[in-house]
Amino acid sequence: MCLIVVGWRVDPDFPLVVAANRDEFHARPTAVATFWADAPGVIAGRDLEAGGTWLGITRGGRFAAVTNVREPGAAKGLYSRGRLTQAFLEGRQSAADHVGRIEMGEYSGFNLLVGDGQSLWYCSNRGTKPLELAPGVYGLSNHLLDSPWPKLLTARQRFSQALTHLPDREPLFGILADDEIVPDSELPDSGIPLDWERRLSAIFVRAEGYGTRASTVVVQAADGSINFEERSFGPGGAATQSSLISTGV
């Protein structure tokens, strides 16, 4: 997943709101979001290569999402980063306990968000200690929390505006569908070739063999009910399917 914007306790009627794009190689096998057969309380897509997930939530409101840190040439970690989210979604420990027990050196560079309904935590194994987040709007791409990459700044600003239209989710999907390329003068220097820096500067990514595979919007209401909507895409950004999963209190 390469872009996540989260509203945490910004609107009292909707304490958790998430808009996220997962960017991945199209050849990587993936299962679309649903309730997991082996963990029936979990709603998430699944990486069929390594078995974990990039983003999910449970009926009880446990939330987790992960992005990688862009660091070309870095050694590969012992475990898939999707294991971090899966372990939290399937577990019972608090968000604070979970981030405090991660063996950071066992994974490639990651950003992790976990929430247990009472608190929302961010952690990374790249130069920052775990942080409990105050109410607000936060964004992650492939650097640290709220790094001022152009697409993240744009998404976060538009997300704040879209919150005023809830429970309508379409403005959030509109943000995730933005495929505008950032001008060269505004591109970050993340160590990848310029042509790829350009392609990945868009919120919605289209590239040869790679791109945005899923756009996901999660809205949790104050009564605990959840709407989890996922829209999937194939090569070239062609829409393939969509699903809406709703839970009651």
Image: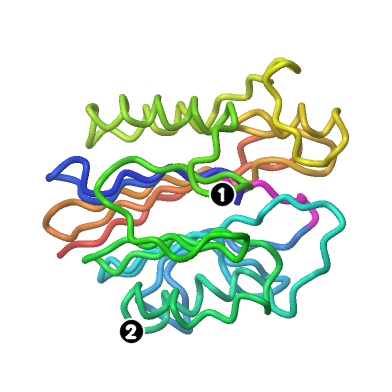
Q: Which residue is mark 1?
A: 144
Which disc is residue 132 wearing?
none
Magenta span includes 85 = no
- The relative height of residue 47 versus residue 177 in the rendered view (above or below) is below
Circle 1 sits in a helix, a strand or a loop, which is it? Answer: loop
Tell me the distance, in whole angstroms, between the alpha carbons under discs 2 and 1: 26 Å
- Label 2 CA crowd tier, 10 Å (few <14, some 14–19, many 20+): few
Provide residue 11's location: percent of width, then percent of height: 18, 40
**Span shown in magenta:** 21-27
Residue at 74%, 80% (x, y): give it.
Answer: 78
Query: Taken as a whole, is the magenta stretch helix, strand or loop?
Result: strand
Q: Amino acid at mark 2?
A: Arg
Circle 2 sits in a helix, a strand or a loop, which is it? Answer: loop
- The relative height of residue 213 versus residue 154 in the rendered view (above or below) is below
- Label 1 CA crowd tier, 10 Å (few <14, some 14–19, many 20+): many
Q: Which residue is mark 2?
A: 92
How many numbered discs, if any? 2
- Residue 131 figure quarter: bottom left
Provide residue 30's location: percent of width, then percent of height: 66, 62
Residue at 44%, 78% (x, y): give it.
Answer: 100
Left or right: 15 with respect to 244? left
- Residue 240 figure quarter: top right
Residue at 72%, 41% (x, y): give it.
Answer: 211
Left or right: 184 with respect to 81? right
